[in-house]
Structures are given as structure tokens and as C-alpha cells.
Amino acid sequence: MGKVRIVTDSTSDIPESVRKEYGIEMVPLKVHFGTETYYDSITIQSDEFYNKLTSSPALPTTSQPSPVDFLEIYKSLTEDPGTEVISIHLSSAMSGTYQSAVLAKSLLEDKPNLTIVDSKSASYGIGLLVVAAAQAAQEGKSKDDILALIEKIRRELRIYFLVGTLDYLQKGGRIGKAAAMFGSLLNIKPILTIDDDGEVNSIDKARGHKKAMARIVELMKTDFGGKELHLTVAHSQCREAAEEFSALLQEHFHISKLTYTDIGPVIGTYTGPGTVAAFAIPAS
């Protein structure tokens, strides 16, 4: 049986140490502050990015990798005829990254065994799929088994997040200006998710951060009942809030695995600092 290698992009927000541990290849998106261009999680890290974001007069922009960026990695991985590649990427509803990967595959002359997966997710919603796939690959699982595992996790995954301010979602075109202004004035916190179509969607709202977190507990009880959970809490420059969030969830759920990660520069362009997010799946 040949090897299976896993590729992703930088919006999966997987720590570099984890990528190295499991041999995960990562193609970066770009962040642009005026004339300055940075490669997400390579030439700019989260802390530097959020410091620049809060001091910059204009919102940065982002851009997807080119097909050539993917092509170079795909060629290097498929030099060995026995290697199969699974490439898992940011929701196609949010970015053209997935389409760039598909186009790169079409440019490969020998059409190697390469499968491109639309995660229909973002941040560690992609990361969970990627890390689970890479772990299974290290265990010697087949490509078909890994693809089935990815689909299982995608079905079971629940995402809930709260932003520190609605300004960045509004500036990035994710919500209307009136909704952002109204929410800010009344301290309304929308409880956001990524829906089955891979788009950001509001599932509920509450007045104030603590009430919003309490409401997420109620939503998770409906989604998971008494199941044991694996939980990842992601945050943008607010580790204390992330730990408070996870402590609340641990009061109500049996969490057998808890990890933290940073929300990286590209996703952070749209969520801003002060965002906390929970990515939860059943333990088995």
C-alpha cells in the first residue's frame, strides 16, 4: 500500500509544530497591508498581524494561492508513483483557494492520484479534518478510509464563535453596516457558525458576552447531549477569554481532549481581535 500525504492551506490554523509532527504540507494565503504583502503564518504570525490590524487605518486585504503554488507541492509529493495526496482547503463559499487547487490538479500532466476536498469550513474546522487525516495516514490507513473519516468528522463537527467586535465582519462584507451598528449599540452578541454550505451564519444572539457563552452551552447540549467530546478552542489575541470559555464548557461536558490554537492572519482579517471559537466533535 502506498503512502498518503496531506496538504492544506494556512487558513486551517494548525500550529507549525503539529504540521511538522504529522508531515502536513501547507500552502499559504497572502495578507496585504497597502503595498506590503505577507505570507500567512510564514512571514507574518498572529501576534504581529493583530498588532498591525489594530493600528492600521485601513482594513488589510487577502488573496488566495495561485494554481502554481499548489502545483509545486503536488509535483514534489507525487514524484513517488506510490504516493497518494489528499488536499483539504478553505470553504469554496469563502474563497477561491479550493478552485486554485482544482485548477492545479488539471495542470498535472500525468494526473496522479490526487483528491481535492472542500472542507466547507474555516480555521480549525479545517484543521480538525487535516490533523485527523494526517494521523490516519501515519497509521497506514488507505486513501478511501481517510476520505471516509474526513466526511464523518465534517458531519459531526459543530462550530460556535463570538467576535470581539462586529466591525471586521462588516468591513469584510460578511454582515451589513446597519446590523453591525445596531448590534454594537445594544451589546448584542451574535452566536456565529459555519453552515453546511460553508458560509458564516448566525444561529442565535444574546446580550453580552457571558450570556452568549451560556447560550452556546445550551446549543451544545442540544447538539451533543451527554457525549464525551474533543474540543479545540481558537482565539485571536484573547487567551484569557479562551480559557474562560473552555472552563465553562468543561463544567457542562465531559471533554477528554482539549487543545488551543490561534486564529491566523487571513481568518483574523474578517473576525478581528477578541474572537473566541469552539470546534467540538464526539470523542468516538
Image: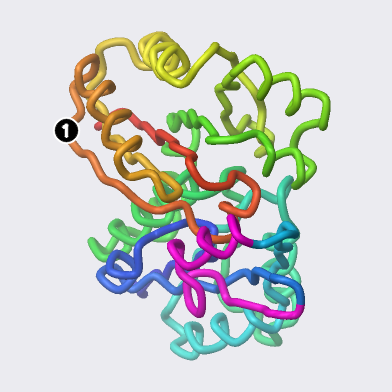
Q: Could you tell me which residue is drawn at 39 percent across and 70 percent down? A: 24
Asked if the stretch drawn in magenta spans residue 254, the answer is no
Please state the total of marks drawn on the protein image: 1
Q: Which residue is disc 1 drawn over?
A: 256
Picture quadrant where residue 37 is located: bottom right
Q: Residue at x 58, y 53 (%)?
A: 267
The local crowd at label 1, few if under 14, some if 14 to 19, many if 20 or more residues have their Cα within 10 Å, is few
What kind of element bears circle 1? strand
Is residue 39 toward the left or the right of residue 253 in the image?
A: right
Left or right relative to 231: residue 171? right
Question: What residue is drawn where x is 60% and y is 21%?
Answer: 190
Question: Along the horizontal axis of the image, is 262 left or right of 139?
Answer: right
Give the quarter of the figure containing the N terminus: bottom left
Q: Position of residue 57 (x, y in %)?
A: 72, 59
For the residue pair 93 and 153, the one nearer the viewer reads as 93
Q: In the rendered structure, which amino acid carries the disc numbered 1? A: Ser
Return the x and y of residue 123 as percentages of the image width and height. 50, 49
Task: Tell me which segment is drawn in magenta.
Answer: 35-55
Name the quarter where the C terminus is drawn: top left
- Report the residue at 37% width, 32% height from top: 280
Res. 223 in view: no
**Can I make out residue 119 in this image?**
yes
Q: Is residue 43 magenta?
A: yes
Q: Is residue 57 left or right of residue 158?
A: right
Could you say which is closer to the camera, residue 165 or residue 281?
165
